[in-house]
Each structure stands twice: as C-alpha cells, then as structure tokens.
Amino acid sequence: MQKRHDYSAEEILRDRIRMEPACDEGYLRLAAFLSREGFFVQARDVLREGLARAERTAPLEHMLGLVLAMAGQAERAERYLAKAAEQEPGNSQYLRDLALAQGMAGKTAVAAGSLRQAVALAGLHAPVEGDGQGGKATELDGLMRLADRALAEQGIRAERRPPKFSPRTALIENLITRDPELAEAFLPLKGGGPQPPRETLLAVRRALRRLVDQHPSYADLYFGLSLVADALGQIETAIRTAEKALALNPRYAEAALLAMRLYEKQGRRDLAAERCRRVTELRPGWLDAHVNLGRLLSEQGRREQAAEAYRKALELDAGCEEARLGLAAVGAAAGTQGGRP
C-alpha cells in the first residue's frame, strides 16, 4: 500500500517559513521533507523561494544542486553546487558534492580538480584523534584515488591547480568550529580598534552558522552571530539573532545589553530602554546599566523613571559623576521635582 503524504507535517514546516522568511533553516527542512516524500518538483520550488528570500543562501544552493543531481540534471546541479562552494569556500562537503556533479556531467578533469581542493581543505581541517570526523578525510582520499585512476585511463594529466579557498579563512572556520568561544577574538574590540577584514568576519559567520545548524538551541552561538552581523553593519540581522539568544536563555544579560545597543543604533530608544531595564533586573550590580537606563528614559521624557535609575546608580557608587549630573539634569527639567539626590 502506498504511503499517504503527511499534509499536516508539511503545513507545520510551511508555518515555520512564514514565521521566519529570512531564515534558511525552514526552507531546508521543508525541502528535505518533500524530497523524502518523493515530491522533488515541490522541493525544488521551495528551495528557489528560499534563494529569493533567505539571508544565507549557500545551504539552499547546495541542497538544490543535490535535488537536481538526483533528478539526473547534472549540469544544472553543478551550477548550484558551484555557487554554494563559492559562497562558503571553507566547506569541503560542498566541494566534494560539486566534484561528484562534475563527474556525472562527464567533466572528469574538472571534477578531479575540485576533489583535490576538497582534499587540501580536509587536510587543513585535519581532525584530532577521537573527534568522530576522521571519516571525511578518508572518504575524500578514496574519491581522489578513483578520480586519478579515471584520468589515467583517459590519458588526461591531472591538474595541479592551487586551492581556490583562502587557507587563512579556512583555518579561522576550523578553529571556531572546534571552539566557538574563539569567535570573539576575531571580532572588533568592544572599546573600538581596527575593523577586522570583511573576509575574516564572513569566515566567523560561516563557522557559527554551521554550528547553529548542529546546535540550534545554543544561545551563545546566536549571540556570536549577532556580534558578527553588527560588525558587518547588518543591524536588523544583529537584532534578530540577539533576541533569539535572549529567547533561548531569558537570563542572558549580555544578550539583553547587546540588543539594547543595537536598538539604540536604530534610534528605537523605547525598545533600547526596555532591554536595558532587563539588564538591570538580571544584573542589579552593573552600574553602567542603571546609568544607561537613566539616560535612555530621560531622552524619552520619562523623568521620574530616569531619576530612579540614576538614584540606583548612585546607591552602587555615590561618586558616579555621570549619574549625579544626569539626576541633576532630570531635576532641572522637571522643575526640581523628583530630583532629590
């Protein structure tokens, strides 16, 4: 008996896309579900929709290439897989699948070149013993030997092209994938300083996104992604990922503080004040949080609440000049009402 399609499950997955249309994960899950059900045309359409709407497109390009390859459309598959590899050059799996599609299309020499890049990348990402990833390099080496044999049988000399990926950015991806806490070392310092190269920021983002795919409930990964988006000038994305971190861990004071700064950058002082108040509740001993809350409330004309925030700051540090001046200014603006020290 033919298995009936689970339309309720499909609708749940489509609801996820409607809730987060800029997130690639929803499109990937729905496309994978449809492919398993045998609806390859619908899976292809979902991935194309994702390419038009999602912020991160490399995984969508990759899956669309695989769907087309399964449908026997090798050359079209190659185009999408090549785009995925170009966008995330540190991903040896993308290079491997590109090589397989190129082989299906009869491009043996080109496929061998892509495999050679994948092998070089896997070597750069040499796994430590016992980390469960040793099979990747072994698989690539085996494929490389088959490719070299096929070239020899056709009398074609193997190409010795240098890898297209940047060894430095691939190394950064590898380091962060192994230890996500290293991500902040490649980001701008909180007190200013030189801006890291864009390719460094993109490498950090690729590594963190890959980790999010594996651990979608880890708030720290979304916090890191928010820092990267902020450094890249993508404030809306930075806010969304900071809020995601806070939703996963409601006691994440650092995420609330980051959201406050991001909302303030956008000029959304009401939301900035709301997140700042959250920080003061989570970390009542943070002097700067009370001072910032007083400033944000004062700018909105909420003088009594601003005065209270400044007073709490002075309770923590009676010598805090910024809180003292802020309280005096609030008092003067209110005709001295609510301005008692």
Image (cartoon, rainbow, N blue to C red):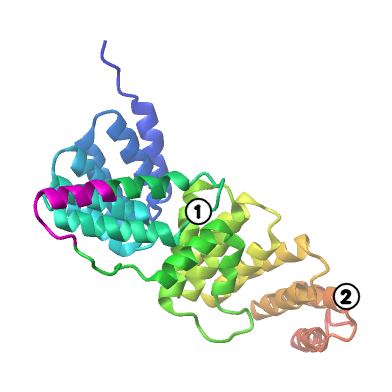
- N-term-proximal mark, 1 vs 2: 1
Which of discs 1 and 2 lies nearer the camera? The answer is 1
The residue beneath circle 1 is 127
Please tell me which residue is depicted at 30% across the width and 55% down the height of the picture.
95
The quarter of the displayed image where residue 245 is located: bottom right
Residue nearer the viewer, 287 or 210? 210
60 shown above or below 286: above
The vertical placement of 129 against 4, above or below, is below
Residue type highlighted by circle 1? Pro
Residue 326, percent across and down? 77, 85
Query: For numbered disc 2, what is the local secondary structure?
Result: helix
Tell me which amino acid carries mark 2: Leu
Towards the viewer: 61 or 316:
61
Q: Nearer the viewer, residue 201 or 28?
A: 201
Does residue 313 show up? yes
Instruction: Say few, some or many: other residues with alpha carbon within 10 Å of mark 1 (under 14 / 14 to 19 / 20 or more).
Output: some
* Residue 179 picture location, percent across and down: 59, 59
Residue extending farthest to the top is: 1
Q: What residue range appears in magenta?
A: 144-158
Question: SS of the residue at dot 1?
Answer: loop
- Judge whether residue 52 can be spotted in this image: no
Q: Position of residue 243 (x, y in %)?
A: 57, 58
Classified by dominant secondary structure, the portion drawn in magenta counts as helix
The residue sitting at 40% across, 40% down in the picture is 15
CA distance separating discs 1 and 2? 49 Å
Q: Is residue 38 left or right of residue 166?
A: left
Say which residue appears at 36% left-offset and 45% top-offset: 139
For disc 2, the marked residue is 316
Residue 36 is situated, as x and y percent measured from the top left of the image, at 31, 31
Left or right: 278 as drawn, with respect to 72 = right
